[in-house]
Image: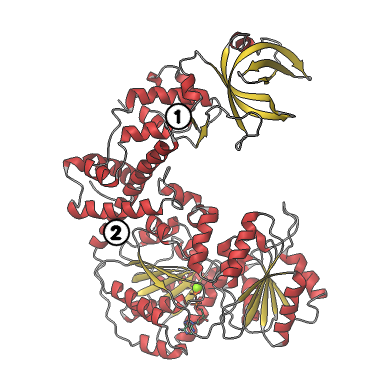
C-alpha cells in the first residue's frame, strides 16, 4: 500500500509525478515522509488594528463588491471589499496581464459579491490598523477542503517549480487518509510505551496536520527519536563489527624508543596526557583495531600523545603515519618529531604535495620497501601509489579539517589499521555521540603548566598595534590576521596583502614583518614559517592559514582584524596560537560587530577560554552544520532530529539502542523485525555502514 505510486492519488498525472520524482517522492511513503519545513498558525487574526508578529493576516469575511482594474503597464489588479463583521478591508490580487485569457476568470467566479471567504495574506497597515490585504491564498467557506488550509496550524512544504502549497497540502492529506492508519510501525510497543511516543500513524498525521502545537511537538519528538534510534543502532553495530576484526599484530611496550623520547621532551607529561597515553596504549594492545578520538583543547599537548603512539608502533616493527591538514603543520610536526627522536634509530620523512617529484619518488619507494618507520604528511599520504607494507597506525590531526570521507579512505587502505583521530575543535558531547558514535573518545582536560592564558580584549586597531610594538621591543613576536588575502571581495574587508604593505611602511616600520597566506607557493610558505619560528621575523601578517597547529611559544600577541567575520571555532583556534610559552599573552579582537550574532561571538571570546564551552555556544549560535559540514550531515540521514536541540532525545535513543542490542544482538525477535528492516535499508543498503545480513 505505502509502496504504491503517488500516481494513484487524485490529481497526480505523469507530469506531476515527474515533478515529485525530482524531489525524491515516488511512493505514498515518500510523500508521507515529505515533511513540512514550517507550520503557520492560521487561526483568524484577532485584532486587525495591530500588525501581527509574523506579518501574516488571516480573515473571514463576506465580499461586498469586487472588480478588476489595470495596474501599470503589465499588471492587473483585482480588488474586493470584504466585510469581516466588525470592519471592512480591501483585499488585493495582482497578476500579470495576458492578452489571450482573463487572468482573473477564477477570481471573478469565487470572489463575487455575497461570497463567504477565508483570506490569507500580508496586511498593509493604514491609519487605523490593517486596511489593505495582499492575498496569498483564499478559500471559499463552503470549500470542503478549506479546513486543511486555514483556521489551524498549516504545514508549509518545501516546493519546487510546478508545485504549489495548496496542491501539496491536499495531496499529502489524501495520502494520509489512504495510508496513515496502515503506516509501518518500526518501533516496538514496549519502547513506545517506555518513552511515551506516538504511533507511526499518529506521528505522520501530527507532523503534517497537527491539531495543536503540543501535537506537533509530540509528532516531531517521535520522528526525531526514531531517526536517532536508527543512527545509534547503526553506530553500535558498526563499532561491534570493527571489534570483531582481528588486526593480527600485537604490541608490546618495550620502551626502547619510548623512554629516550620522554627524556628528550624536556618537560613532564601532564596527568591528563599520561592518562590518555595509557588509554591509547591499552587500545593498541587489544586484538581489534583502535578507532579513538582524542579531544583536547588548543595547546593541551595532543602532539606528544600522537608521537608516543607512533613510537609504540615502531617499537613493535610497524610503520605509522601522521596526517595533518596543512603543509605548514605537517612540516612543523616533522620537526617536532625529529627533535624528539634525535639519536634514535627511527627513520622518518615528510610527504606533502610540495615535495619535488624526484624526492617524492624515492620517498614513496622507501615507504613501500618498509624502509621508513614514520611518515608525516598531508592528504598527499592518501594518494594511490603511497603504500606501506607494515602500516599499523594512522594518526589524523585536526580531523575536523578533513571529512568523514578521508577518514573512510584511510580505513579502506587497511581495515586492520589502528586509527587515532585528534581534534581541537571540541565537539559537544551530543554531537560526538551522533557523529562519532563508533569512536572511543579520550579527552585531555588539563593544560600544560606554566602556559599563560591569553588576555582577550575587543580593541581599536591603534591599541592592538601598540601591543605589537611593545612585544617586539621585548623580543617577542606577534601575529596579525586578516580575513582575506586580497582586496576586492564582496565585503569591504581589510586584506593581508595590502595591510602588510601598509603596516610595513607606517605603524610597524622598523620591525621585521613577514606575510603568509594560502595562495603562496608551498616552498615560500614553509620559508616564511620557519623564519618566524626561528625568531627572524617580529610580526607575521597572515590569513587563516595559521589557524591550526602552529606552535611558536615566543609569539605573545595575536591581533585579529575584522574579528566579527570569523566563526567562534576559528577565533578560538587563532587565539590558541599564542600563550604557548610562559610569557603573558594578549589577543586583540579588532572591528565592529555588524550583527547581534557577531557581537555574541566576540563577547563569548572575551568571557571564556574553555574550548568546550565555546563549542557549545557555537552549536547554539550556528547549529551543527559548522561541525559536521553539510555533506556529513546528509550522511547521517537526519531530517527531523536536530542535534543542537535534541540532546536529551539522543541520550535516550543511545540508551535504548544499547539495551535492544544487548538483549538481541541481531534484532531477530519478531517485534524488532520492522526496525531491523528499516535499519538495513537505510544504513546497510544505502550507506553500507553495517552488515546485518
Ligand atoms: P595541541 O594540543 O594544540 O596540538 P601541542 O601538542 O602543539 O598542542 O602542544 C602545545 C605546546 O605545549 C607545545 O609547545 C608543546 O611542546 C607543549 N607541551 C606539550 N605538553 C607539555 C607538557 N606536559 N608540559 C609543558 N609543555 C608541553
Ligand atoms: Mg595540534
Q: Nearer the viewer, residue 133 or 222?
A: 133
Q: Is residue 5 visible?
A: no
Quadrant where the N terminus sits is top left
> Residue 105 at what x, y percent from top left?
63, 10
Query: Would residue 519 appear left or right of 625 to someone viewing this image?
Result: right
Q: Nearer the viewer, residue 303 or 300?
A: 300
Q: Quadrant of residue 118?
A: top right
- Secondary element at tag 1: helix
Which residue lies under the disc numbered 2? 239
> Residue 627 at what x, y percent from top left?
49, 57
Q: Above or below — where is 601 with respect to 202?
A: below
Which residue lies under the disc numbered 1? 21
Q: CA distance from mark 1 to mark 2?
A: 35 Å
- How many numbered dots are placed on residues in this image? 2
Q: Above or below — where is 295 with respect to 252?
A: above
Q: Above or below — where is 210 with respect to 483?
A: above
> Residue 308 at what x, y percent from top left?
39, 80
Circle 2: is it few (<14), some (14-19), or many (20+) Cα within 10 Å?
Answer: some
Q: Residue at x 47, y 90 (%)?
A: 266
Q: Residue furthest right?
A: 506
Q: Nearer the viewer, residue 268 or 586?
A: 586
Whichever of callouts 1 and 2 sits on the residue coming sooner in the sequence is: 1
Q: Residue at x 46, y 15 (%)?
A: 144
- Secondary element at tag 2: helix
Q: How is the image coloured?
A: secondary structure
Circles 1 and 2: CB atoms closer than 8 Å? no
Q: Residue furthest front?
A: 86
> Residue 389 at what x, y percent from top left?
34, 69
Q: Residue at x 52, y 32 (%)?
A: 41
Amino acid at each position: 500500500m505505502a509502496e504504491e505510486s503517488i500516481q494513484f492519488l487524485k490529481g497526480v498525472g505523469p507530469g506531476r509525478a515527474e515533478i515529485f520524482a525530482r524531489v525524491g517522492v515516488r511512493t505514498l511513503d515518500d510523500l508521507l515522509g515529505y515533511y513540512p519545513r514550517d507550520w503557520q498558525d492560521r487561526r483568524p487574526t484577532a485584532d486587525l488594528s495591530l500588525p501581527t508578529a509574523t506579518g501574516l493576516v488571516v480573515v473571514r469575511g463576506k465580499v461586498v463588491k469586487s472588480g478588476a482594474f489595470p495596474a501599470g503597464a503589465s499588471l492587473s489588479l483585482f480588488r474586493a471589499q470584504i466585510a469581516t463583521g466588525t470592519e471592512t478591508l480591501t483585499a488585493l490580487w495582482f497578476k500579470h496581464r495576458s492578452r489571450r485569457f482573463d487572468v482573473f476568470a477564477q477570481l471573478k467566479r469565487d470572489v463575487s459579491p455575497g461570497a463567504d471567504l477565508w483570506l490569507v495574506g500580508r496586511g498593509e497597515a493604514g491609519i487605523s490598523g490593517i486596511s489593505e490585504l495582499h492575498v496569498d491564498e483564499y478559500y471559499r467557506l463552503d470549500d470542503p477542503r478549506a479546513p486543511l488550509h486555514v483556521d489551524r496550524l498549516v504545514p508549509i512544504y518545501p516546493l519546487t517549480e510546478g508545485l504549489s502549497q495548496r496542491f501539496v497540502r491536499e495531496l499529502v492529506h489524501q495520502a494520509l487518509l489512504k495510508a496513515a492508519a496502515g503506516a509501518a510501525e518500526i518501533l516496538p510497543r514496549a519502547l513506545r510505551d517506555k518513552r511515551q511516543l506516538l504511533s507511526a500513524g499518529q506521528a505522520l498525521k501530527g507532523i503534517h496536520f497537527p491539531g495543536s502545537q503540543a501535537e506537533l511537538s509530540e509528532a516531531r519528538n517521535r520522528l526525531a527519536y526514531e531517526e536517532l534510534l536508527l543512527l545509534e543502532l547503526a553506530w553500535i553495530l558498526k563499532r561491534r563489527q570493527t571489534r570483531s576484526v582481528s588486526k593480527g599484530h600485537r604490541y608490546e611496550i618495550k620502551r626502547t624508543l619510548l623512554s629516550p623520547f620522554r627524556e628528550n621532551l624536556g618537560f613532564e607529561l601532564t596527568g591528563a596526557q599520561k592518562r590518555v597515553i595509557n588509554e591509547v596504549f591499552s587500545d593498541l594492545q587489544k586484538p581489534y583495531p583502535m578507532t579513538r578520538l582524542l579531544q583536547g583543547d588548543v595547546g593541551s599537548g595532543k602532539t606528544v600523545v600522537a608521537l608516543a603512539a607512533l613510537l609504540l608502533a615502531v617499537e613493535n616493527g610497524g610503520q605509522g603515519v601522521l596526517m595533518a591538514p596543512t603543509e605548514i603543520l605537517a612540516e612543523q610536526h616533522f620537526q617536532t618529531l625529529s627533535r624528539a627522536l634525535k639519536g634514535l634509530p627511527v627513520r622518518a620523512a615528510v610527504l606533502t604535495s610540495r615535495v619535488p617529484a624526484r624526492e617524492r619518488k624515492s620517498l614513496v619507494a622507501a615507504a613501500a620497501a618498509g624502509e621508513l618507520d614514520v611518515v608525516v604528511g598531508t592528504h598527499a599520504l592518501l594518494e594511490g601509489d603511497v603504500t606501506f607494507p607494515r602500516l599499523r597506525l594512522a594518526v589524523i590531526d585536526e580531523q575536523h579539517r578533513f571529512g568523514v570521507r578521508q577518514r573512510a579512505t584511510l580505513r579502506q587502505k587497511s581495515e586492520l589499521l589502528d586509527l587515532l583521530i585528534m581534534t581541537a575543535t571540541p565537539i559537544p558531547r551530543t554531537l560526538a555521540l551522533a557523529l562519532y558514535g563508533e569512536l572511543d573518545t579520550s579527552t585531555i582536560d588539563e593544560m600544560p603548566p606554566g602556559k599563560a592564558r591569553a588576555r582577550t580584549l575587543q580593541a581599536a586597531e591603534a591599541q592592538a598595534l601598540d601591543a605589537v610594538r611593545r612585544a617586539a621591543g621585548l623580543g617577542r613576536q606577534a601575529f596579525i590576521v586578516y580575513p582575506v588575502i586580497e582586496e576586492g571581495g564582496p565585503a569591504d574587508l581589510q586584506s593581508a596583502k595590502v595591510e602588510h604593505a601598509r603596516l610595513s611602511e607606517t605603524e610597524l616600520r622598523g620591525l621585521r614583518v613577514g606575510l603568509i597566506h594560502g595562495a603562496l607557493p608551498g616552498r615560500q610558505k614553509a620559508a616564511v614559517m620557519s623564519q618566524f619560528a626561528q625568531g627572524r621575523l617580529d610580526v607575521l601578517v597572515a590569513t587563516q592559514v595559521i589557524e591550526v597547529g602552529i606552535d611558536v611559544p615566543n609569539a605573545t600577541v595575536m591581533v585579529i582584524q575584522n574579528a566579527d567575520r570569523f566563526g567562534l571555532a576559528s577565533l578560538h583556534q587563532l587565539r590558541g596560537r599564542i600563550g604557548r610559552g610562559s610569557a603573558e599573552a594578549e589577543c586583540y579582537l579588532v572591528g565592529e560587530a555588524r550583527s547581534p550574532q557577531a557581537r555574541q561571538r566576540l563577547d563569548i571570546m572575551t568571557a571564556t577560554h574553555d574550548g568546550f564551552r565555546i563549542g557549545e555556544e557555537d552549536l547554539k549560535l550556528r547549529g551543527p552544520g559548522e561541525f559536521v559540514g553539510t555533506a556529513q550531515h546528509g550522511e547521517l540521514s537526519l531530517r527531523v532530529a536536530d542535534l543542537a536541540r535534541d540532546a536529551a532525545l539522543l541520550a535516550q535513543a543511545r540508551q535504548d539502542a544499547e539495551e535492544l542490542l544487548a538483549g538481541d544482538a541481531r534484532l531477530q525477535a519478531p517485534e524488532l523485525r520492522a526496525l531491523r528492516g528499516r535499519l538495513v535499508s537505510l544504513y546497510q543498503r544505502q550507506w553500507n555502514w553495517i552488515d546485518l545480513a
